[in-house]
Image (tube, helix red, strand yellow):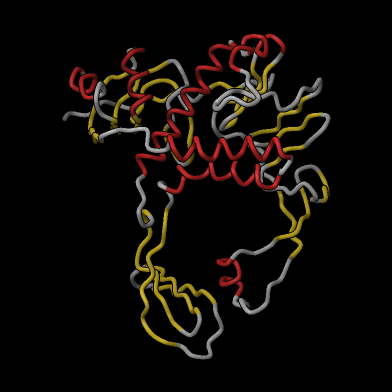
Amino acid sequence: LKSLARILKTKAVVAKVLIETDEPVYGVRRDRLVFPVGRFWTSLCTPELKYALKAGHLRQVETIVTYAQEKIFRSYVDKFYELRLGFRSAGADEYEELCKKMLNSLYGKFGQKGENWLKIGDCPGELDREELMFNMSGRRVTKLRYLMGEIFIMISTGESFDSFPAIAAHVTAYGRLFLWRLMQQVGSGNYYYCDTDSLIVNETGLRRLRKDISQTGLGGLKVEESCSHLVIRGLKDYSTESKNVTKGIRKNAIRVSDGVYQQELWPGFRGLLRSGKAETYRIQTITKHLNREYRKGYVRPDGSIVPFVYADEPVTL
């Protein structure tokens, strides 16, 4: 642990560590991303490791990877944020939204997964499509793609070209800890919901966040909405008097019944290939059935959430 603390003074670090904590602040993927308490193994980045060391939550370190560090996105962020504010002042909403997306999505490209395809032949006249070939003896599945008269086989999946997952992981880690600091500042019982970059708080929570609110300052909090009625159904699934937010459901979707919606499906490139009719673009009407079971913690009768408790064992290194 002393070596890790010394390295963190000058380097960025990704490490697999054993955590023992009573704070649900560290993410770990067990089928899905959860934030448990107790003792568990997980991989953390520089800001999380510093927090864990300071809080006394680190119990064991298995693997460490170090990186030179720099503020690599400073000029990019400064330029696009300046453009965004300019477009906002000019009332150019479309360009302001474009700048917002450029700011929010760049870091994730470094963690993007990809597929590697190899051309294996020509197939003039064949329809563009994708096929799955099942080898029952070897229990393998092979994916073929017919595209523009050529045949490709998918040979592997993994990181995409020029990826660097440590960059995406660090940006995510800094964001999570910033959100955690705000939650601690607001105080337990004064926030009702948190998402990737937002909090829903009561009046007390709002007062405690006043100094962090800025409608134009980079990184400042912005008050998006005030409401007197709130229904939280699950992750990215809530309603106020003025809007309904449900991940995967369009604003113009038709509600058939509770948790059942009809909406248009506009297929993407892969969807067209899978349909086997890539020469025709078809907009379909689909019915979506929502599964609103919460699986990131225990739900109390009053609707509040208790984190899972893990009890992983140390390892002999």
Q: Quadrant of residue 246?
A: top right
Is 242 located above or below residue 128 in the figure? Answer: above
Q: Nearer the viewer, residue 293 or 195?
A: 195
Q: Where residue 81 appears, x then y in whole percent?
A: 56, 36
Is 27 located above or below residue 253 in the figure? Answer: above
Q: Nearer the viewer, residue 127 or 313?
A: 127
Query: The N terminus appears in which quarter of the rendering?
Result: top left
Q: Where residue 146 appears, x then y in whole percent?
A: 49, 79
Q: What residue appears at the point 54 percent right and 40 percent down from the top-left corner?
A: 80
Q: Where residue 233 appears, x then y in whole percent?
A: 70, 32
Query: The C terminus appears in which quarter of the rendering?
Result: top left
Q: Where residue 183 appears, x then y in whole percent?
A: 56, 17
Q: Is residue 299 left or right of residue 311?
A: right
Q: Quadrant of residue 242?
A: top right
Q: What residue appears at the point 41 percent right and 62 percent down from the top-left corner?
A: 115
Is 242 located above or below residue 56 in the figure? Answer: below
Q: Is residue 195 left or right of residue 120?
A: right
Is 31 located above or below residue 230 in the figure? Answer: below
Q: What residue appears at the point 59 percent right and 30 percent down from the top-left corner?
A: 195
* Residue 133 can be seen, yes or no: yes
